Image (spheres, rainbow, N blue to C red):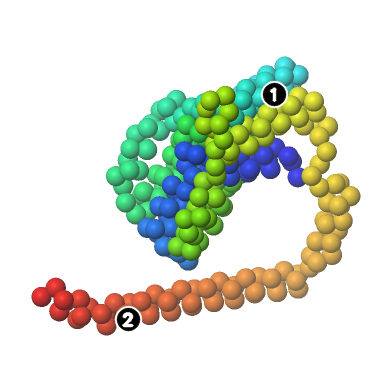
Amino acid sequence: MDITLLSAFLGGVLALLSPCAALLLPAFFGSTVGSGSRLLAHGLVFYVGMLIVLIPLGMGAGTLGAMFTAHRTQIIIVASIVLIVLGVVQFFGFGFDPARYLPGAEAARTRSATATGWTKTFLLGATSGIAGVCAGPILGAVLTLAAAKGSIVLGGIMLAIYGAGMVVPLFAIAALWSRLGKRARSVLRGGSVTLFGRQLPVVSMVTGLLLIAIGVLFWTTNGLVSAPSLVSTSSLARMQEWVGSWSSTTVDIIVICVLAALALLWWYLHERRRARKSAEDVRDEPRRSKARH
């Protein structure tokens, strides 16, 4: 597994938990969307909104890096310095809002505040990936890594994974929102410490240290070329051999049938729950009508 892809995903998680955004989006989805299939559907729309903005950014960064492939050494040095500087900025809480520098981003954020339903979810996704003073250095670091890759496709993939890093914990928290007490929400927000007379959020400090560490690692491993793989080559070969041993027409048919059965079961339970809710609404309508009169 490429360590930069893992870094992109972790960056999305930390961007969501940053002091500017912590629990704001989970609170919205947990209290207004609900749970189950409805939450999942809104989650997909939210993520699509993110991808429409993030993937072009990643591809643009990859294109920029690809233009200078002949100067790989200089790009690695510049990218490492940028990562370390962004880490220091993040550590001390001096962020910036990338949305200010993208045309139309501020207008989309304004529309998301007044929109409702699916439109609001889509616009929130489109703006959440790039907006936020606290998350600015994190997004900048991921874009720097994407540019250093020098690949248009990998640049787009990295930003898509960064968005997934935000979406996965967001909807996990939203699904459990009603069960979270004040103590749990306080833990998710994280604490702060006083350093040099300044209140520094712990999440920002941890994020800053990680960015600095990635910058140093990027420099010392020639752009992560000589960095150790998270999964050894021999382990990957054994996994591929094991998967290959299960690859057959019979197994494929069984898997497809099981997935189809699960999909039908989910659809049946969803429709049954919706029918039961409709019946309850019809049964309670005379009571509500009587109360109004």
Q: Name the residue under label 1.
A: 80
> What residue is drawn where x is 76% and y is 19%?
73
Q: From the viewer's perspective, tell me whether residue 129 is left or right of residue 107.
A: right
Kindly give the residue lying farthest to the right in the view shown.
234
The location of residue 61, given as percent across then percent down, is 59, 28
Q: Can residue 119 be seen in this view?
A: yes
Residue 114 versus residue 218 in the image, above or below: below
Q: Say which quadrant the N terminus sits in.
A: top right
Residue 216, image x, y percentages: 74, 26
Marks 1 and 2 sit apart, C-alpha to C-alpha, by: 61 Å
Kind of element beneath mark 2 = helix
Q: Where is residue 168 in the image (x, y as percent from the top left)?
A: 56, 52
Q: Residue at x 43, y 47 (%)?
A: 24
- In the rendering, which numbered label is found on residue 279? 2
Q: In what element is the residue under mark 1?
A: helix
Q: Which amino acid does label 2 sit on?
A: Ala
Q: Sort mark 2 into few (<14), some (14-19) or many (20+) by Cα contacts within 10 Å.
A: few
Q: Is residue 107 left or right of residue 12?
A: left
Is residue 187 placed above or below 147 in the rendered structure? Answer: below
Left or right of 202 on screen, residue 29 = left
| Residue closest to the eye, 198 or 155 | 198
Q: What residue type is labelled 1?
A: Ser
Task: Categorize mark 1 by other alpha carbons within 10 Å: few (<14), some (14-19), many (20+).
Answer: many
Residue lying at 54% horizontally and 38% vertically, measured from the top left: 192
**Total of numbered circles in the picture?**
2
**Residue 143 is at least partly visible in this image:** no
Q: Residue 127, image x and y in percent?
A: 43, 39
Eyeballing the image, is 283 above or below 245?
Answer: below
Earlier sequence position, callout 1 versus callout 2: 1
Question: Which image quarter holds the C terminus?
Answer: bottom left
Location of residue 149 by image quarter: top right
Q: Nearer the viewer, mark 1 or mark 2?
A: 1
